[in-house]
């Protein structure tokens, strides 16, 4: 079990830096079923890795200085389920901290993430995305 926990800890650690995130995405199934809970512009159910990353990570990267950066706070592993508690260490293009907190409940199929339910601060995401997208359009 320690081998699986160490593997998953290393996997989620790739999210800390946009330069290493491709190593994380390589372990997400192309047909992942990813639900982002909440009432904000990124909420919804995505049926592929490409659909999810385009609608969320790519959109956030346009309003966050240096892109999306997530640090693991807690990791819980039980069989094919991993719960990752993450915190954003990003800053908006306006210079405000984007210290959102996330909880991802992930189901693995072998070494690949097959399904995720993600929970986060809807108000913070909505404010940061909409305000910074408007700032970019105005500038």
Image (cartoon, rainbow, N blue to C red):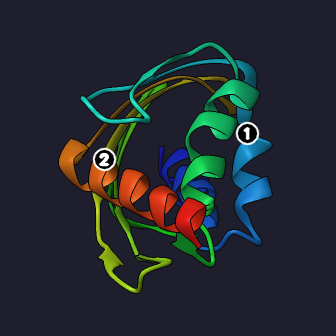
In the image, residue 1 above or below residue 72 = above
C-alpha span from label 2 to label 1: 28 Å
Instruction: Identify the residue at horizontal 30%, vertical 27% (top origin).
Output: 37
CA neighbours of label 2 inside 10 A, class few (<14), some (14 to 19), many (20+)? some
Q: Which mark is residue 54?
A: none
Asked whether residue 63 is in view, the answer is no
Q: Residue 72 occupies which quadrant of the picture?
A: bottom left
Q: Are marks 2 and 1 in contact (CB under 8 Å)?
A: no
Residue 33 locus on image (x, y percent) = 56, 15
Image coords of residue 21 (percent x, y): 71, 60
Q: Seen in the image, is 6 located left or right of residue 76?
A: right
Residue 8 rendering spot, x and y as whole percentages: 55, 50
**Residue drawn at point x = 19 percent, y = 48 percent:** 123
- Is residue 85 visible in this depiction of the protein? yes
Pointer 2 residue: 126
Left or right: 55, with 118 as reference point: right
Q: Residue sitting at 29 percent across and 61 percent down?
A: 100
Numbered label attached to residue 27: 1
Residue occupying image coordinates x 61% and y 53%: 7
Q: Is residue 56 above or below residue 65?
A: above
Pointer 2 or 1: first along the chain: 1
Secondary structure at numbered mark 1: loop
**In which quadrant of the rendered view does residue 60 lie?**
bottom right
Give the label, 2 or 1, closer to the camera.
Answer: 2
Q: In terms of depth relative to the viewer, which is nearer, 64 or 53?
A: 64
Question: Which element carries disc 2, helix, strand or loop?
Answer: helix
């Amino acid at each position: 079990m320690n081998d699986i926990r160490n593997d998953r800890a290393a996997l989620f650690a790739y999210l800390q830096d946009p330069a290493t995130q491709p190593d994380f995405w390589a372990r997400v199934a192309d047909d992942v079923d990813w639900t982002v809970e909440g009432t904000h512009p990124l909420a919804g159910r995505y049926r592929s890795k490409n659909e999810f990353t385009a609608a969320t990570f790519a959109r956030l990267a346009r309003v966050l200085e240096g892109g999306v950066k997530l640090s693991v706070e807690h990791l819980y592993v039980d069989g094919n389920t991993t719960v990752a508690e993450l915190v954003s260490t990003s800053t908006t293009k306006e210079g405000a901290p984007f210290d959102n907190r996330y909880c991802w409940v992930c189901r693995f199929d072998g070494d690949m993430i097959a399904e995720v339910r993600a929970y986060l601060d809807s108000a913070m995401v909505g404010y940061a995305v909409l305000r910074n997208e408007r700032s970019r359009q105005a500038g």
